[in-house]
C-alpha cells in the first residue's frame, strides 16, 4: 500500500460511468488494482470562500489557473478526529495539492481565532491564502461515497469512484453529518484517474474498449451553480460562523 502523502502533483482525469459501465470496467481491471488506506469511505469536504464566492467564480472563469481551499474528513469526525486542511490548485492541466493534518478542535481554533496549531511550510502557505482572501468562511459542504484504489504495479496511479454526491449550504460543520442535496443522478458514478505521468496502456485500452471518455466536472462548481440557480443566491448562502464564538468549551 502506498505511503500517505501531504503533497501531490499529478494529472487528474474525470469520467462519468453508468452502473453497467462501472461493473464491466471493474471486472476488467480488478486484478490490477488494490484498495487504498481508506478503501470505501464517506468523504466530507468543507469549501471556504468569500462572501461573494470569489474563489469558485475565479475557478470557473479561469483558463489556466484555479485554486480552492477546503477542509476534508473521512467519515463524520468528532473534535478529536484527524482532518485535513488543503490547498488545491490546477495550472495548465496539472493538479497541485498541499495539505496539513490536525484535530477538528485545532481547526476550529484556527478558523475562529486565527491560532495556528503549528508552523510548517504548508501551514504558512494556507495561512497566507486565508489572509489573501480576507479570511474566507465555510460556504459549501460536499459529501459523497468513495471507493479508492491504487494500481498494484504502480502505486502512483490511483482510481476513485464517487457516488451519491451531495451538498448543503447551511449547517456547515463536518461533525454534523453528511446529509445534503444530490447533484449527481442515481445510477451514475464519477471516476477519477490520477497519475504522475502517462496513463498505462492497459488502462487506456480498457477505456477505449468500453467507450469511456473524459468529462469536465467540478463538485463545488456544480453545487455553486445550483445555489445561484435557486432563489437563495449568494447572500442566503452565508452562514452564521461568527469569529469569536468558540466551537468547543
Image: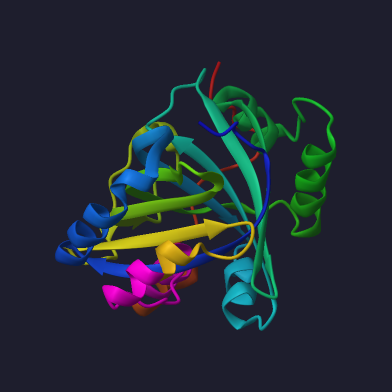
Residue 206 lies, in percent from the top left, at 33, 67
**At 83% from the left edge and 33% from the top edge, which residue is drawn?**
120
Instruction: Name above or below for residue 149 compared with residue 112.
Output: below
91 left or right, relative to 179 = right
**The C terminus lies in which quarter of the figure?**
top right
Query: Closest to the observer: 88 or 231?
Result: 88
144 left or right, relative to 200 = left
**At 49% from the left edge and 70% from the top edge, which residue is drawn?**
234
Instruction: Name above or below for residue 122 compared with residue 130.
Output: above
Instruction: Name above or below for residue 237 compared with residue 208.
Output: above
Does residue 232 appear anywhere in the picture? no
Magenta span covers which residues?
205-226
Task: Say which quarter of the image contains residue 233.
Answer: bottom left
Does residue 179 appear anywhere in the picture? yes
**At 35% from the left edge and 56% from the top edge, which residue is drawn?**
167
Task: Say which quarter of the image contains residue 232.
Answer: bottom left
Amino acid at each position: 500500500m502506498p505511503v500517505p502523502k501531504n503533497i501531490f502533483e499529478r494529472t487528474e482525469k474525470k469520467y462519468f460511468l453508468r452502473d453497467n459501465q462501472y461493473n464491466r470496467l471493474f471486472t476488467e481491471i480488478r486484478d490490477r488494482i488494490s484498495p487504498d488506506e481508506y478503501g470505501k469511505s464517506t468523504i466530507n469536504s468543507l469549501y471556504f470562500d468569500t462572501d461573494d464566492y470569489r474563489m469558485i467564480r475565479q475557478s470557473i472563469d479561469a483558463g489556466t489557473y484555479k485554486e480552492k481551499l477546503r477542509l476534508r474528513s473521512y467519515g463524520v469526525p468528532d473534535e478529536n478526529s484527524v482532518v485535513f486542511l488543503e490547498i488545491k490548485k490546477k495550472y495548465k492541466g496539472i493538479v497541485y495539492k498541499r495539505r496539513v493534518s490536525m484535530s477538528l478542535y485545532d481547526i476550529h481554533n484556527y478558523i475562529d481565532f486565527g491560532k495556528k496549531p503549528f508552523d510548517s511550510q504548508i501551514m504558512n502557505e494556507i495561512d497566507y491564502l486565508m489572509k489573501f482572501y480576507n479570511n474566507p468562511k465555510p460556504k459549501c459542504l460536499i459529501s459523497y461515497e468513495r471507493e479508492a484504489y491504487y494500481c498494484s504495479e504502480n502505486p502512483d496511479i490511483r482510481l476513485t469512484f464517487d457516488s451519491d454526491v451531495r451538498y448543503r449550504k447551511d449547517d456547515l460543520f463536518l461533525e454534523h453529518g453528511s446529509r445534503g442535496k444530490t447533484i449527481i443522478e442515481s445510477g451514475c458514478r464519477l471516476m477519477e484517474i490520477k497519475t504522475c505521468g502517462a496513463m498505462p496502456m492497459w488502462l487506456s485500452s480498457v477505456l477505449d474498449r468500453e467507450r469511456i471518455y473524459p468529462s469536465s466536472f467540478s463538485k463545488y462548481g456544480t453545487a455553486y451553480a445550483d445555489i445561484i440557480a435557486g432563489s437563495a443566491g449568494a447572500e442566503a448562502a452565508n452562514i452564521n460562523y461568527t469569529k469569536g464564538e468558540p466551537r468547543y468549551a
